[in-house]
Amino acid sequence: MLFNFLTIVISCSILPKWSVRGQTRPNSTFYNPILPGFHPDPSCIFVREWDNTFFCATSSFNAFPGIPIHASKDLQNWKLIGHVLNRREQLPRLAETNRSTSGIWAPALRYHEGTFYLVTTLVDDDRPQEDPSRWDNIIFKGKNPYKSSSWSIATHFAFQGYDTSPFWDVDGRSYISGAQAWRVSPGIYQTTANLDTGEIREWKPIWNGTGGLAPEGPHIYRKDGYYYLMVAEGGTGLGHMESIARSKNIDGPYEANPANPILTNANTTSYFQTVGHADLFQDPSGNWWGVALSTRGGADYLYYPMGRETVMAPVTWKKGEWPVFSQIRGEMSGWVFSPANKNIDGDGPFINEGDSIDFTPGSEIPAHFTYWRFPISDSFTMSPPGHPNTLRIKPSRLNLTALNGNYAGPEGQSFVGRRQQDTLFTYSVDVDFAPKVLEEEAGVSVFLTQNHHLDMGIVMLPGTSSTTPFPGTNSTQASSTELTPHFRFRGESYVPVPAPIITPVPTAWINHRLTLEIKAFNKTHYSFSAGPADAKSQMQTVAVVSNDPVSWGFTGTILGVYCTTNGGSGNTEAYYSKWIYSPQGQFRD
Ligand SMILES: *[C@@H]1O[C@H](CO)[C@@H](O)[C@H](O)[C@H]1NC(C)=O
Ligand SMILES: *[C@@H]1O[C@H](CO)[C@@H](O)[C@H](O)[C@H]1NC(C)=O
Ligand SMILES: *[C@@H]1O[C@H](CO)[C@@H](O)[C@H](O)[C@H]1NC(C)=O
Ligand SMILES: *[C@@H]1O[C@H](CO)[C@@H](O)[C@H](O)[C@H]1NC(C)=O
Ligand SMILES: *[C@@H]1O[C@H](CO)[C@@H](O)[C@H](O)[C@H]1NC(C)=O
Ligand SMILES: *[C@@H]1O[C@H](CO)[C@@H](O)[C@H](O)[C@H]1NC(C)=O
Ligand SMILES: *[C@@H]1O[C@H](CO)[C@@H](O)[C@H](O)[C@H]1NC(C)=O
């Protein structure tokens, strides 16, 4: 079923009623995902001391800024309020990761005695499993999540594994648990730890899970005299699920819940699949909620360009019993929400907002804009002299694939974008770009990873290059070997992509500001179009492409702009303006 944004807003206010202790109170209705787009491995907390606010952290892999934090006061309106990893000196090694699946894996966000703790792992997935330098386990601390600079640099601790999560016991002792799913006998390990210094004792195995693949994503909760250990199993694909065990002793032995798995959509026909990697928290009324990751693509598991997104479910957790999750669907009913409250600090947008950005002089790069690893900062300039209301991008020698589809080294890539957060959308920018040298290129991309992206650029090529005349025109330069700007669609993926489509920029459009547009016009396909910025009626479609080639791996698509010499000698900059992202619908069930 398709809901557009307007429908969602309206339907949130049409609520069923039921009676609690004589009062009539509405149960909540809400829609998954709560954090659409590339927001996997959620970890959420409720912090009374910070004006009764919920905070969620999610994985960011090689994206920078990394580890976004979203906040809400009503579990309905979620706002990006900042990023834990927001400056190079916090974790310089993010520049060196050598694989698309590398970078920041699952964060665990907790609040303890006035301090926010974020424990996570920088994984260099290219190194062997048994190489300790593959797993860089780290702790960030912050006093004010609305202020990026309040997050500390990383404190490192030794663990040959990932998905590390902290726990403070009532006796004052603190612990970290983590996953070593890669071992011959995979399992969850735990140690006492000093979360301030990173000092750890001895990693001890505490639970092997229920026998599913890759027990991981552990979190410990203390309730009614038990330690509950909740883990993900089954791998992060269609077999993904969440299981739980408990013990009166934090070191175990842990006894598995007979009702495991407590959360999964495996073996269902639901549009929401791969549900798992969960976390639990309470609201101001003491009701329990769970978050998890899920991909929207059904059991075919072919078309899910937004990757692993954050979903939420009410949880019933009676005294002395096991927690019970509601099954993940698009439309959910759950515990009563606090009244809607959008009064939240922080620079970022609310999660359902589109973009209409003019790069006004004096403004900053918007908080939700994302690079791939650290940007070369002087490559991105807002409204440079003589070019007001533009974002100037200096070309990188490397293109979006860069060195081997996995590595970019210190040179980096000139790319910046925003997450795709809607099944249907239109994204467009205007660009002034006058290439001079062979292979100079500027354009728009649906970027998933360096080895999975779909690009439409304006690129300098010999006139003989075209594979097709531009629709509705005659390709007058087709026989010339003189360099001339072309539109080029090109895709990179492990899944077959169409051959490049190359067509000369119509002569009348050369030296004009052009509009480049990407549109997800249905659940499975994007169109890439171009035309003169001052005559939108002349827009022409350059390519229609499946999103299957960008449905892969751990991340989700980012829509953005790039500028590259493709290894050539040029240095022509691109000036982007009128950045628009319009949400046009979510498919939910
Ligand atoms: C990146 O990985 C590739 C393939 O494993 C390897 O050949 C290359 O040396 C690595 N580069 C760096 C800088 O680690
Ligand atoms: C996990 O499995 C291994 C191999 O069967 C076993 O030796 C170990 O005791 C188990 N660990 C726990 C905590 O149950
Ligand atoms: C899904 O079905 C397969 C095959 O019957 C089974 O092995 C697996 O345990 C099931 N997964 C869940 C989470 O129920
Ligand atoms: C309201 O939501 C809670 C949590 O899921 C559930 O236990 C309860 O049955 C719901 N009440 C109604 C009337 O649907
Ligand atoms: C393309 O060329 C043909 C033959 O020269 C001409 O008749 C036609 O009008 C041209 N079309 C455009 C759009 O320029
Ligand atoms: C989306 O449109 C493409 C191209 O018109 C078509 O091939 C595809 O079947 C459509 N997908 C859906 C889900 O309707
Ligand atoms: C990227 O650039 C390299 C040369 O640096 C080139 O061989 C390759 O075709 C380009 N690929 C893409 C997808 O841009």
Image (cartoon, rainbow, N blue to C red):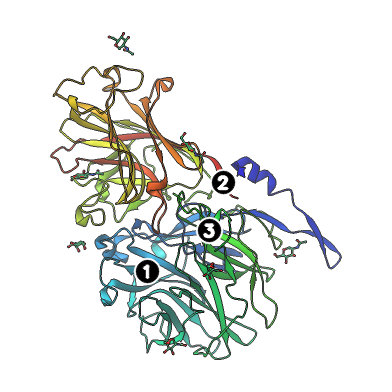
- The secondary element bearing badge 3 is classed as strand
In whole angstroms, how far apart are the C-alphas of marks 3 and 1?
Answer: 36 Å
The residue at which mark 3 appears reads as: 273
Mark drawn on residue 587: 2
Q: Residue at coordinates 17% horizontally, 20% vertically from top-left? A: 479
Write down the quadrant of residue 469 in the picture: top left
Give percent across and percent down for residue 24: 83, 60
Chain-order first, disc 3 or disc 1: 1
Asked if the beta carbon under badge 2 is closer than 8 A to the nearest atom of ligand 6, the reply is no
Task: Specify whether residue 153 is in view.
Answer: no
Which image quarter is the N terminus in?
top right
- Indicate the amino acid at tag 3: Gln
Q: Residues within 10 Å of mark 1 (few under 14, many from 20)?
A: some
Asked if the beta carbon under badge 1 is closer than 8 A to the nearest atom of ligand 1, the reply is no
Q: Foreground mark, 3 or 1?
A: 3
- The secondary element bearing badge 1 is classed as loop
- Indicate the amino acid at tag 2: Phe
Write down the quadrant of residue 434 in the picture: top left
Give percent across and percent down for residue 546: 41, 41
Asked if the beta carbon under badge 3 is closer than 8 A to the nearest atom of ligand 3, the reply is no
- Whether 179 is drawn above or below 526: the answer is below
Asked if the residues shown at circle 2 and circle 1 are in contact, with their CB atoms under 8 angstroms apart, the answer is: no
In whole angstroms, how far apart are the C-alphas of marks 2 and 3?
Answer: 13 Å
Q: Residue at coordinates 36% horizontally, 59% vertically from top-left? A: 86
Mark drawn on residue 152: 1
In whole angstroms, how far apart are the C-alphas of marks 2 and 1?
Answer: 39 Å
Task: Specify whether residue 371 is in view.
Answer: yes
- The secondary element bearing badge 2 is classed as strand
Give percent across and percent down for residue 82: 45, 57
Q: Residues within 10 Å of mark 3 (few under 14, many from 20)?
A: many
Give percent across and percent down for residue 463: 18, 24
- Whether 199 is drawn above or below 64: the answer is below
